[in-house]
Amino acid sequence: MKPLFKNLVRPFRGTFLTLLFTVPQVPLIGSLSSQTALAQQTPSCPAGTRLENLNWQGENFQPGNFNQTLNIGGANVNFRMVENPLGIIKDISPENSPGGLGAVPYGIAPGPYGGINKPYLRWGIDARGSNLGGNATLIITADRPVIFGSPLLFLDVDRDRANELEEGRRYQDQITVTASNAGVNVPVTLVRGNNIRDDVNVPPPPSVTEVVGNVARGQNPRVEPGNVPPSNSGGNVAATFAGPVTTIQIIYESGPLYKSPNPGPGQDETIGLATDIGVCVPTALGSIGDTVFNDINANNVQDSGEPGIGGVEVKIRNSTGQEFVATTDANGKYSFPNLIAGQYTATVSKPPSGFTPTLTQPNPITLGAGQNYLDADFGFTQQPQGSLRLVKRITAIARTNGQRTQYNDVIDDPNDQNDNALNPPPVGQFDVQTPVQSGDEVEYTIYFRTEQSLENINLCDLIPTGTTYVPNSISVTGGGTGADQGRFFSPLTPIDQIPESSVCGDRTNPNGTVIVKLGNIPTAQSGSVSFRVKID
């Protein structure tokens, strides 16, 4: 009888996979306070990308709206303002608020400001009284990693006027800028941006701002004029990022004002963000597709006369973990257009009812710039009456500290119909929530049950990436006539000459393979195959 199943690997899911591939945190790196930005820096983008600017007016940015999303070159960029405590974002002199923003000065205001006569994003806080020490945090997030073609320019990060101490009023702006790409820190460099202004025909004014690492504030000791006028660029600060980012966070708060007699935070006024924001977007976008089909003869190829299967949900995930979903049409076709270059995984998480997978993707798929990858096919064969049912579970984890956790509960996987049909029902976890560490051992168990007698059944399971097979850990129960106790083939060992390897979905054997002869199995027989791997 022809083998019924090809590649039975189930990937790690949930936090198990996330922690396994977590990239170490990268420390933030700041600039020296003596650095200054170049006058009217020309935007630039890497090869293969073009600059797309944010059109604030065309996107109708709403004043006082603390959470709104704009589109820049196909990237959805969200601007969210968070108050701590609530109500701290205001202007103590709303009648002086440019653009009529009033007591909540968060929104687009007309210039000039920071020496630039263009609209800018303005916000401020009143950190007196019960709000003393509070802050306003602007969080900018993109739905994909973006490269900024020019620095983000913060305006008017300064101190108050000369008689501030006599009046007991201590004004000092302070911003802290951080960035990350899918949760991994991206180094930030801040420079005093007093050279970035409209008027470049006269020498730049003195900078009244100091920069320490990724923190910028009104300079201490105060440099005249202290609180710069709107036409002055002396309080500007430019931020650049060492790589693509998905999140930028700007915490705006009262500075420490070290000078006696009353050092400590006081009340800020306002700052701004120049609206000349542009991101570098790919000039060539690609796609991933093609067909989910009925693999009638289970040979991993869509032969003539094998139809597509409509209504099947296909998912792809990029290297940052972002997911995209498409559904096959009546002919089994699907497509994910407008994709940037990079690595993707393609999966069908829920097979069509009554079908068993035969052909899956050799993930990851590496997509080049402008490439249309049209070989992401998925094959499924209909389960005949009296088929072999299989379920894979994690049944134990042995920690490096000697602790061993055995999973003996029956937990239903809503995406697997077979686990409801096995008798006895399988035990173990289908999605491990407990974090694992390097050196931990994970035990897999594959349960099977026949509904009629089957012949020459073989099982192949690939060792997951990021793990190493534990020697002599294979255990087999319930095999029929001609069964063996299983064999392990080391990574890259040629297995093409092994007859039983015909059921393996990836015969290149990238990380090691477990192959078991189950032989001729009688009707209604249950059994299992277990083995262990160690987390690298």
Image: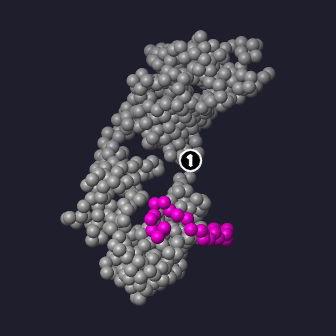
At 52% across and 68% down in the image, what residue appears?
393
Q: Position of residue 306 (x, y in %)?
A: 24, 64
Q: Is residue 349 above or below residue 156?
A: below
Q: Main secondary structure of the magenta part?
A: loop
| 409 magenta-colored | yes
Q: Position of residue 125 (x, y in %)?
A: 63, 23
Residue found farthest to the left: 304
Q: Is residue 422 above or below residue 81?
A: below
At 41% across and 77% down in the image, what residue appears?
451
**What is the image's colouring?**
one colour
Q: Is residue 249 visible?
A: yes
The local crowd at label 1, few if under 14, some if 14 to 19, many if 20 or more residues have their Cα within 10 Å, is: few
Residue found farthest to the bottom: 481
Q: Is residue 99 above or below residue 424?
A: above
Residue found farthest to the top: 95
Q: Position of residue 158 (x, y in %)?
A: 62, 21
Q: Position of residue 72 (x, y in %)?
A: 40, 33
Q: Is residue 326 above or below residue 439?
A: above
Quarter of the image with the C terminus is: bottom right
The magenta stretch is: 397-421
| 360 magenta-colored | no
| Residue named by callout 1 | 26
